[in-house]
Amino acid sequence: MEITINEAEIKEGCKAYVASQGINLEGQSVEIKLTAGRGVNGFSAAVVIGVDGTKKAVKNTKNDIADELKEEEEEENTINQDDGDDADRLFGD
């Protein structure tokens, strides 16, 4: 048996999957971008959920999540770097 589903059905399946993960899509715009990768990367879908013009991307690949975590860690390291001068000025020393 072979079942072929079209792009619209794939996108509806992606929406259903995101909703099953506990993300409320009711009243929100949902954009799904399908990408065909090469080799072991296969296919992927980026789901963009928007509320009142704002958008939040739901990452679904290991590489996207790893890259995002690395960026957040780098930002935290940059913010946490302190030469000590600010602390002295805060306490009047």
Image: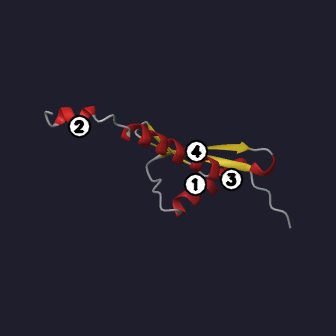
Can you tell which of label 3 and label 4 is closer to the viewer?
Answer: 4
User: Are there few (<14), some (14-19), or many (20+) residues within 10 Å of tag 4?
Assistant: few
As drawn, 5 above or below 91? below
Label drawn at residue 15: 1
As drawn, 12 above or below 78? below
Q: Which residue is most to the right?
A: 1
What type is the residue that disc 1 sits on? Answer: Lys
What type is the residue that disc 3 sits on? Answer: Ile
Q: Earlier in the sequence, mark 3 or mark 2?
A: 3
Give SS at disc 2. helix
The image quadrant that residue 53 belongs to is top left
Dots 1 and 2: beta carbons under 8 Å?
no
Dots 3 and 1: beta carbons under 8 Å?
no
Label drawn at residue 10: 3
Q: Earlier in the sequence, mark 1 or mark 2?
A: 1
How far is disc 1 from disc 2 in space, using C-alphas?
49 Å
Give SS at disc 1. helix
Dots 4 and 2: beta carbons under 8 Å?
no
- Write down the residue under mark 4: 67
Q: Residue at x 52, y 59 (%)?
A: 19
Looking at the picture, how far across and down is residue 86, in whole percent? Answer: 25, 33
Classify the position of the N terminus by image quarter: bottom right
What type is the residue that disc 2 sits on? Answer: Ala
Q: Earlier in the sequence, mark 3 or mark 4?
A: 3
Q: How many marks do you count on the picture?
A: 4
- Write down the residue under mark 2: 87
| Horizontal arrangement in the rendering, residue 2 relative to residue 71 (left or right) | right
